[in-house]
Amino acid sequence: MAAGGAAPSVMKVEQHGVGRIPDIERTARPVDLFRLAFGGANTFATCVLGSFPILFGLSFWQGLSATVLGLLVGSLILAPLAVFGPVNGTNNAVSSSAHLGVHGRIVGSFLALLTAIAFFSISVWSSGDALVGGAHRLAGLPESTWSYGVAYAVFACLILVVCVYGFRFMLLVNKIAVAAASLLFVLGVFAFAGDFDPSYPGVFASTADPAFWPSFIGATLIVLSNPISFGAFLGDWSRYIPADTPRRRVMGAAFLAQLATILPFFFGLATASIIATRAAEYVDPAAPNYVGGLLAVSPTWYFLPVCLIALIGGMSTGTTALYGTGLDFSSVFPRFSRVRATMFIGVLSVGFIFLGRFALNLTQSISTFATLIITCTAPWMVIMMLGYVTRRGWYDPDALQVFNRRQRGGRYWFSHGWNWRGMSAWMLAAVVAILFVNIPGQFVGLLGELAGGVDISLPLGLAIAALLYLALLVAFPEPRGVYGPDGPRLVRAADVPVPPIEGPGAPAAEVPARV
């Protein structure tokens, strides 16, 4: 490892925002990225996603096939997003300045911000419900508004404390959570072995049933969306990895972390098939209640592990989501330190959790909202990946920080701080994808029925972003200065000057780079 010096204490509050992490403090390893990415998904929220193939009417083996396919494809799409952190020493939203422009990078920041708030809310709600439900079955705790309110408040406050301390404390929590939650899920093998039947048939007589393939594709895409939901966050965690770490190891850690989530996905799939057999009312597609169904079919001795999974998993998911929220908010509003931004967004998020659960009844709507945000995030990820390829992985870390320093100019200034090529590709792909969203009973886009009831929004958004972005780079070449000494790959470059960086902290005189 190139970085020297010992890692700071976990009890020391992290002061770094989105500025480049000094090399001497970049002591994390790819295995730490694995722990954070896997820990953030090794929870009840993922189990709920794992139950969807059964809700869609698939058999156990058909559901397992959809789950494995979705995980493989989603992990492959996600993995390249892990390299920006080590390369630039900052988060992915800031790195996106290179492809969307100094001002265009706010797209990544707000996508990450909204995704984090949504998943933080889902994490607190699902874990709090499981904790109260398990305590009710185990010790007779009343399932009252007060019980749920206390559970949500405890979860939210614990998560907020961890996030305020920062990366090292969060890493410690996830080191414990990964092992503990995995062990508790494995205990489920003994809890449900007598009831589990892998020959669960589902509702389709054969794959020739006209409704089978829409259900299979829909289940696959729901699983695929889980890895993609981490795309905007990977740089938050990988920026502490030394810059000279082999890229394949960094991408491998992100890839394997998502493959490892087969554990909670399998748990959700298997237990959902049991629920569908023994307590079918809990898997009614019109009003599914996975947590309630799980508690209904669990043996008494497994109620305590259910409570522990809720506590540990909720902490892990909540911290990885809220940490990125504070970081991105401080990047959009540089006057906020990371700690102040985390506290501010944390308090707002806690308020949203209580209003959404008890006043506005948004527990179902937030899942739909999260899906729509992920649909918009996927094209952004494609632009980042193709940008990395065309730039040969070369970036100017100083020029990436222009927005944060309230400066102007630099390699990534493009047209008044906006790179219209990347922005146009993202906006068109995101809009078209939203139009093709098809979530029955929740949200159906204007063109959502054109594919015969199949939700093709995610693959369509990915494809449009890829084709349009490359076409624009070829038709309207970017300045040669953004490509570094080896020049562009696959596309051309334009010989135009790069404006000097101006503003607070900029050199007194800087000669524009012309290649």
Image (cartoon, rainbow, N blue to C red):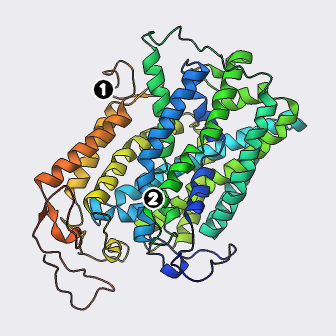
Picture coordinates of residue 496, whole percent (x, y): 10, 71
The residue shown at (35%, 35%) is: 459
- Of the 4 image quadrants, the one containing the C terminus is bottom left
Picture coordinates of residue 387, whole percent (x, y): 28, 57
**Residue 477 visible to the viewer:** yes
The image shows residue 155, relative to residue 170, as above or below, that is: above
Q: Return the residue found at the far bottom.
A: 508
**Label drawn at residue 399:** none
Tell me the kind of residue under disc 2: Arg
Q: Mark 1: which secondary structure?
A: loop
Between label 1 and label 2, give the one nearer the viewer.
Answer: 2
Picture coordinates of residue 316, whole percent (x, y): 65, 53
**Label drawn at residue 447:** 1
The local crowd at label 2, few if under 14, some if 14 to 19, many if 20 or more residues have their Cα within 10 Å, is some
Q: Mark 2: which secondary structure?
A: helix
**Label drawn at residue 248:** 2
Tell me the kind of residue under disc 1: Leu
User: Which circle's residue, 1 or 2, is located before the other in the chain?
Assistant: 2
How far is mark 1 from mark 2, CA to CA?
39 Å
**Residue 149 visible to the viewer:** no
